[in-house]
Image (tube, rainbow, N blue to C red):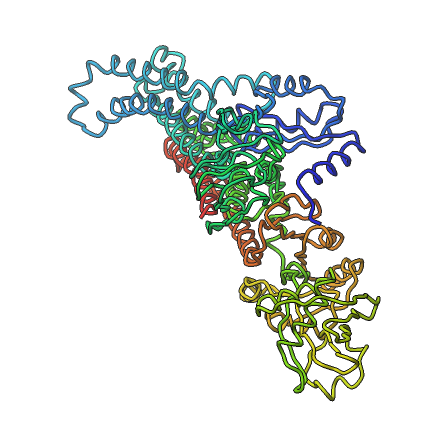
Amino acid sequence: MKESINDTIAVDAVGEAATDNHLLDLDIEGMTCASCVARVEKVLLKEEGVVNVAVNLATHKARLKVNRDVPVENLIDRVERAGYGAHLPVAGEEFSPEAERARIVRRQTMIAIPLATVVVILAMVPMIFSGLQATLAPYQQVLNILQFALTTIVLFVPGREFFRIALKSARHFTADMNTLVALGTGAAWLFSSVLLFAPSLLPGLDPHHLYFETAAVVVTLILLGRWLEARAKDRASDALRNLGSLIPAISHRMRGEGEEIEDVETDFVREGDMLLVKPGEGLPVDGIVEKGSVVVDESMLTGESRPVEKKVGENVVGGTVNLGGAFVMSAGKVGGETILSGIMRIVDEAQSSKAPVQRLADKVAGIFVPVVLGIALLTFLLWITLGDGTVSEGLISAVAVLVIACPCAMGLAVPTAIIASTGNGASHGILIRNAESLETAGRVDTVVFDKTGTLTEGKIAVVDFITVPTEERSRLLQLVASLEAMSEHPIAGSIVRYANENKIALLAVDHFETEAGVGLRGIVDGQQLLVGKKSQFAETDSLLPNVPDGAVWVSINGQIAGAFAVADTIRPEAVEGVATLAQMKVEPIMLTGDSQAIADEIAKQIGINRVIAEVLPQGKGEVIRNLQSEGKRVAMVGDGVNDAPALTIADLGVAMGGGTNVAASAADVTIIGDDLRRVPAMLHLSTRTMQIIRQNLFWAFFYNIIGIPLAAFGLLSPMIAGAAMAFSSVSVVTNSLRLKK
């Protein structure tokens, strides 16, 4: 029996209770770079009772493992005193923080662009068109004051967040990206303002050599970059929002005997309520079909839009779409207990988790800003003390260093890829529990499949029926099927189904008995039948020499009459799935408790070369360990319950679910449905994700390693540095979005 979402939640709750710890999520506001992440984690870890903290820049969430006695108010207070906002997530909230942030930054950008454009025109036109210099000379002071006024508006209206957060950080003796931007643009603005209004304080410098356009353009470019970044991050989170939108806000609840229907909010539907689902509507909750003809689109579960028929008494899942006529269902699992809610929790947890590869970025980010501040100061001092450098040249080079340094790209390199990848997986029926599992999957070189219920459907079927020449085939099938109809054994059921398929009518059974280890005995239509294993009969090979191992033999009145070759039905997608793994240079292995001969035959049909057979359930874990000792990185694919020990021991545990088993606790990955082609698809997605992450990290580090020295040596103007900094974050997020395809 497969494990349900509720079973898993209960197990998790018991485990947390045993340690007196629990998981807590906080929404964090005001984070802009990897340094912010490091600071929030640092202040939260200072609170007594906090065991672990993982802060995600892409989702703006903090996931904490804390003692149950820790007051949430203390945690929120610590975050706020560090200069950020924090609050508990709102249940059922459909609000997108990134979408709102994109709207705010877009408004700021739209204010800054025209103002900065005018400043650039005022500063650059006289230099570009030399003929205008003499004409504008009498008005130069007025034009400079206008530059000052417009730049001041740009910095302290749309750009005020840089300075507000930088001041908060300074009060707590910390620094982040906002500090770099505020110091860089603020220094250029202050230097130019002193030259404009009090040039005597800076003797020897040209009072018309101002840098207002530098400050205005840098702030505008960074705002533009933040807007594009926020839009891209919002797109990366589409998958989770799309899942939530599948549940209709309003349900049609039936009252009394069904004569009256009332529209209620889906949140108020309770177990046992009778609901009317109209054509084209989404199902509001999980439940059972009570009346009507039902055809549903289960693509949200399986990733395939193939219509599925549901009969009265069958289960239906909230979030699937009614493609047929109106029908009535009774509500079963509601609210947070539905299958869709379980899927959303898994996706949310995966997107909020941290991959091991992110540790390097976090370590660098923790010291990045102070190091950049030191480099900028050293740049300024070296420019004014060595060679022919001037104060203005030193200042501009230092500003370029401050502006080009970008911890944002480092902070976004991993989480944006994780969000896009896990969202893509969920939309195709692949649920990855955390970022570490995603990283592990990318290194798998061996996939071990449990046979029954994974490679095969777990349903025994008759594949051949052989009789001795003297027996009439249909008559023998009628006698045997009549006797087998008295048994509950799976093989008996397969023979009865085979008779039904051949339109054979069953007879009355005069006598029936089961003998343990032997088979069935009985009398049908005056004939004495024995149905059982080959070992119970004599001279089988001489009478029927080509019967495969594992067949069910039949005798009538003590004489061999025939045999049924039975086998588990191979899943239709198994051959393609295994072939794809081979193309990926991943070795498939079949693990089963069946005899070697039967296992080899099934493996041959599927295309698997290595078979480990006759293994008891408790011995599967040892097989996985042996493979790992050979240096293999092993993924185990099973049903999530019977194979739980092996799934846990494997480097990666993959549970196949029949549509409801989305929370198999032993598994790192859950495949919704039984399509084995999703196993290589999952490995391919993981490999692509790690490639994207490596590209992102390379770009983030390479950009800073190359850009900072160029800026320090005066080879980059602050405006180019600002554009490059904005581009670095946008490029990382955009690269991650390729994983959505």
Q: Quadrant of residue 215?
A: top left
Describe residue 146's horizontal placement relative to residue 622 as left or right: left
Would residue 696 be visible to someone looking at this image? no
Describe residue 606's horizontal placement relative to residue 9 as left or right: left
Residue shown at 78% from the left, 69% from the top: 520
Q: Nearer the viewer, residue 16 or 59?
A: 16
Residue 553, compared with residue 327, is above or below; it is below
Residue 49 horizontal/vertical position (percent): 76, 25
Question: Residue pushed farthest bottom?
Answer: 542
Residue 287, compared with residue 488, is above or below; it is above
Residue 146 horizontal/vertical position (percent): 28, 14
Residue 73 horizontal/vertical position (percent): 67, 17
Residue 351 horizontal/vertical position (percent): 57, 38
Q: Quadrant of residue 192?
A: top left
Residue shown at 28% from the left, 25% from the top: 117
Q: Nearer the viewer, residue 109 or 608?
A: 608
Describe residue 647's horizontal placement relative to residue 419 as left or right: right
Describe residue 252's horizontal placement relative to residue 51 as left or right: left
Residue 317, compared with residue 654, is above or below; it is above
Would residue 596 be visible to someone looking at this image? yes
Q: Nearer the viewer, residue 582 or 188?
A: 582
Question: Residue pushed farthest right?
Answer: 516
Residue shown at 63% from the left, 49% from the top: 669
Q: Quadrant of residue 141?
A: top left
